[in-house]
Amino acid sequence: MLLIDEEGTVIQGFVPAGRVGTFDLISGSVFKLQNFFGSKNKNQYRVADHIAIVSFSWNSVLTVIDNPPVQIPEDRFRFHGYDDFRANCDSKGDLYDFVGHMRLVNGQTISSHAVLDEVDIAEKRHLSVHVQIHDGPVMKLYLWDNAAFEFCLKFKSYDSAPSVLLVTTLNPKHVGGTFCLTSMSSSRVFMDTDVQPTRDYLEWLSSNTDVANRIAADVVTKPEAVTLEELFSYIKQAGSKVAWFECTATIDDVIRDSAWYYISCGDCNTKAVKGPSSLICHNKKCVNNEVMGVAQYLTRISVYDKSEQTVFVILGDAGKQLTGKDASELVANYFKSNEGVRADQLVPVPQALLDAIGQTRKFIVKVSDHNLQGKFRTITVTKILPSEALLPGKPDGIPKTGGEDFGPSRGFVNSAGDKARKAFESPESAGAKRSKSG
């Protein structure tokens, strides 16, 4: 929670899990708090500038003051603009508040009252809003769970579509390669006339509609499109940072001298290994004592464009975007079709992956610290866009599969086109890595 005292100082409050429900907390009320202790504010996901946190203890006493002698503001916001959000992207640092105007809600314009599909939002657990601060760039904002539910309630409560949106404690990060803002469990949602900052912004918006509409509503920050040669040129530049790019490349082959999947913990997606009697999760923070193993994509593919050739690593959801199937489904299908195979048998590369050979796709790729430090040349794929073009046929040298479900598990086969392209550089050994979201 955020606590504001009579001097206007804002500090973060914390109630331990064992004491939740003990105190009758009412937002906007004035309390007298006795018997508490202070601790240092964490650097990650901070919601207040003060270096300390007020922590409630077992003997804390909270008393409501009905007629406070000093007027204390109910809210205090920490607004930041596009440049500040961008500078703090993926830093897991302070969580800031946003106030601006909405351009799109789940892809719909709000000039006429948009109809929100609450059933779909509930199933997906989120909605997206394109937002803008004055005449700045358009940003994509993801509202999750309670924040999405609160947005729907407030949006429907207005007779005409609201224009201004204020959301607290937002985390700037990359999702699928695109810079965006995402809500946290602590995020709260306000609109047009809810609080003074939204009323002030609404007043500005009503007299500056030409400025507010200067940028097209469907504009959103996207990864820069580059060739493979330009991608590696960026990696070699001094001072380059972790970044996301869009690359259009043709899939030359699927690397078959190592496993195309790994077994993860069903709760946190971290690699799981065999223990004495069950699987063990490598994530020390995971509290799952009975690990249910789930197959996840860890697939290396050889790709090329007119400028270069390299290896992409397909992880998690990107694998399903390529094949249309979950890795767990493909593994289960193999064992179902081969009943005599031992449970620890390595599943050969499935036909669903081999069918991608020869396809030209758009990949959202991440240049990681390992690439910048010169340790690995292989590039991680975070998203694969829908197929737009398919080459007439597979490169020469790719064996016919005859329609079987799984191809042979063997080494990399060079196509005839390799002679005209640059020599393939051997990638690092494919160690199982955790599939990270957004």
Image (spheres, rainbow, N blue to C red):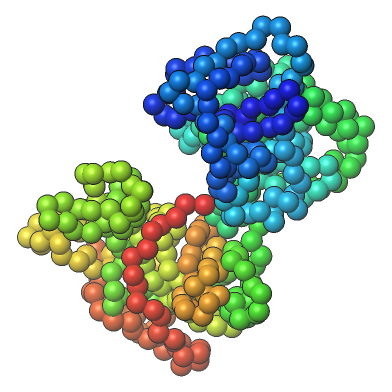
Q: Is residue 16 above or below residue 171?
A: above
At a point 58% along the width and 58% down the height, the residue shown is: 177
Query: Is residue 355 shown to the viewer in this render?
Result: no
Left or right, 224 with reference to 354: right
Left or right, 249 with reference to 412: right
The furthest residue to the left: 340
Tell which of 215 and 296 is nearer to you: 296
The furthest residue to the right: 207
At a point 72% along the width and 38% down the height, the residue shown is: 78
Query: Residue 132 placed where, x, y %?
Result: 76, 42
Left or right, 415 with reference to 142: left
Examine the image and state in which quarter residue 270 appears: bottom left
Tell which of 122 and 24 is nearer to you: 24
Query: Residue 319 placed where, x, y %?
Result: 40, 59
Query: Is residue 40 shown to the viewer in this render?
Result: yes
Left or right, 197 with reference to 253: right
At a point 50% along the width and 90% down the height, the residue shown is: 422
